[in-house]
Amino acid sequence: MKLLQTAERISHEEVSDHVIFQRSIFAYHEASKMVRNTLLEIGTGMGYGMEILAPHVQHYMAIDKYSSELVEKNKDNINFEFYQQSVPPLSGIENSSVDSIVTFQVIEHIQKDVEFAKEVGRVLKPGGQAIFTTPNRKMSLTRNPWHIREYTVNELRELLKPYFSTVEILGVYGNEKIKKYYLENKKAVQKITRFDIFNLQYNLPRFVLQLPYDMLNRMNRKKLMKQGKENIMDISHRDYQLKEADDSCFDLFAVATK
């Protein structure tokens, strides 16, 4: 099944996604330093993270609600398993059966986030690590109607604490090039939201807002790309860094150990 290409599903093929895509790639590079043995990725999306993570593990398990070309590419790979399902639960995954879990930009889409965190803890081996990334609500420019909710540093920590022995919340930060792009994006978004005098973005149901949000988001990314393509295309995952999270990081990067 071909995935609907919304602004919410980041693609390396869409040039206007470049900055966000590099931020996503950064998380995979950081995770590649931590994963081992049997790895489960929950929410593989387009599957672009597999080529970064797979060389560091012996067995790769993937879950997504959509099938993708990732399945076709790995049809003869005996060290690859794909489960097409919505989560939670993590159906078909045994208790204490995986060494590492990555689930990037997923938990904000999950209605039953407590059950999801519990399920991740269930399938992880003792001593294993689960890595979650999710947007930092404090840095969101507007309501994203594709997200059930977003988290602050403390909210994510409190969600994960009951199911893991330790939870470290790191943050994804950018250098001056990234900050400049963020500020330009913020100005553009504010030009749009200033007309929302009745605060409809927070008062209307999510499903009503998803299509207009997606159209405006894509339009805004294309406009920013057109205005500064040369500088924007120069941005890479190396322009991001990981350190202790605070309210100014772009994404939360939680490392939870069972």
Image: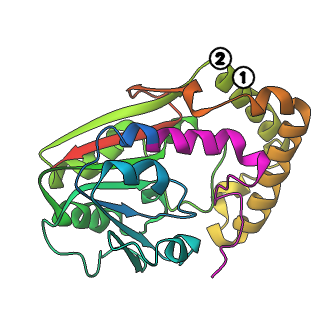
Q: Relative to residue 48, is residue 29 drawn left or right?
A: left
Protein image colouring: rainbow
Residue farthest top in this picture: 176
What's the magenta region? 1-28
Decide whether residue 17 is among the magenta residues: yes
Q: Relative to residue 184, is residue 167 drawn left or right?
A: left
**Residue 181 position by quadrant:** top right
User: Could one spot residue 9 in this view of the protein?
Assistant: yes
Q: Residue at x 81, y 60 (%)?
A: 215
Q: Relative to residue 24, is residue 132 drawn left or right?
A: left
Q: Three-letter amino acid code at disc 2?
A: Glu
Residue 177 versus residue 194 in the image, above or below: above
Residue farthest front in this picture: 76
Q: Residue at x 59, y 19 (%)?
A: 175
Residue 176: image tag: 2
The answer to the question of whether label 1 and label 2 lie on touching residues, with beta carbons closer than 8 A, is yes
Residue 223 versus residue 51 in the image, above or below: above
Q: Position of residue 194 (x, y in %)?
A: 82, 41
Q: Secondary structure at mark 2?
A: helix
